[in-house]
Amino acid sequence: MNNYTDEKELSILKLEMRGVSRRTFLKFCAATAVLLGLENSYGSVLAEAAAEAVKKKPIIWLQGQGCTGCSCSLLSSLNPGPAEILLDMVSMRFNTTVMNAAGYLSVDVLDKTVKEGNYLLVIEGSIPTADPRYCVVEGMPFEELVVKTAKNAAAVVAVGTCSAYGGIPKAGITGAKSVSEIITDKPVINIPGCPFKPDWLVGTLLYYLSFNEVPPLDNDKRPLAYFGNHNIHDTCPRVSYFEKGQFLMDWNDPATVNWCLFKVGCKGPVTFSDCNRNWWNDGVNYCIRAGSPCAGCVQPQFYENFAPLYAPLFDLAAKEEPKEATGSDGGRKEGFDGLSVAVGAGMTAALVGGYKALQALSKTGKGETKDG
Ligand code: SF4
């Protein structure tokens, strides 16, 4: 850390002024390195990259068809949280939620950054295609803005499930599409979640800035380090109840409050993320531990194919028409056809111990493509 240029020292100083000490910052980078599957010593590499990023990689953050929950998730992370690290260390040139500028001033900055090129483009929200009037940003249809802005981007990051796979808007009438359905000529990294967890984005950006390459991704273009290898069910604290066939049916019954949530809609068996290893809100808790079934919000099937949220997977599987999910690998059929077959064959025993059949439905987490 001693060989920082003045500019790098300045960015560290900015963090210190906000109450984030140099030690805390380095600790955060070391922890991020471990989560990314790197050696602990890579923490200083990430720190170096973050400090360097202030002058090297501007970020443009566009917001389309969504609820702003992803921005809220990032900005409300606790102190010293990933938001401070990200917002103080990188050069966020354009972000409709947090920037002060408006009108032609903001458009000028956007145009100038696009012209200079070599920036990271972060997109929140889905892209409506049924009618250009459904989402207009900076005076132009959002799809047009996305295409124009992606043109000179070094890489594109889709944050939140709306942006990554279509999410809740895809269940509606707007023809909502994911970023990778619109941008097909450059790397797209998906950081899904409804909303996404801030450390997923910060760690991914630090990796990209450190090694100048997209981190290893799963088949759904999600960083393997945070998603692909982590099945929620496999390490769930309630899994022993699942195996004994003890399922919570009534939240008001104190005797069963810690039992398995499968029958009240838990999608944990087909969901891949590190939520139960690295809890939300800077380690406070996560859905299942708080008594809520996993909604599977990081999966391409969310929301349409996982609704109603409190319906068990087996009930959804029994629907007559299996639906095709917004898989990002082009033509991959998702849905519940495999499970329907299992149910049809009378395999109700799969409820206890046979959840691998459920996991097979989600073919995520098995691929290890470098650039998706
Ligand atoms: Fe945990 Fe859900 Fe699996 Fe039950 S079904 S053990 S609550 S992940």
Image: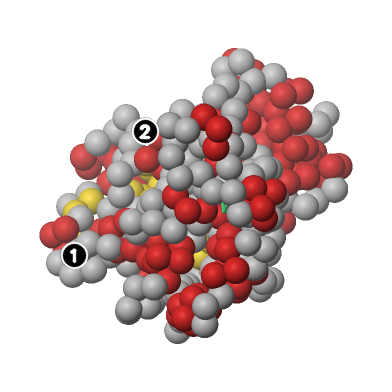
Q: Position of residue 282 (x, y in %)?
A: 60, 30
Q: Position of residue 127 (x, y in %)?
A: 30, 62
Say which element carries label 2: loop
* Closer to us: 255 or 7: 255
Residue 6, relative to residue 64: is it above or below? above
Label 1 Cα neighbours within 10 Å, binned few <14 / some 14-19 / many ≥20: few
Q: Quadrant of the N terminus?
A: top right
Residue drawn at (30%, 63%) of the image: 170
- On the question of residue 215 being in view, the answer is no
Q: Amino acid at mark 1?
A: Ile
Residue position for label 2? 98
Q: Amino acid at mark 2?
A: Val
Residue position for label 1? 173
* Closer to us: 74 or 276: 276
* Closer to us: 228 or 188: 228
Residue drawn at (47%, 33%) of the image: 253
- On the question of residue 29 being in view, the answer is yes
Q: Earlier in the sequence, mark 2 or mark 1?
A: 2
Q: Position of residue 344 (x, y in %)?
A: 47, 81
Q: Is residue 232 left or right of residue 43?
A: left
* Closer to us: 198 or 183: 198
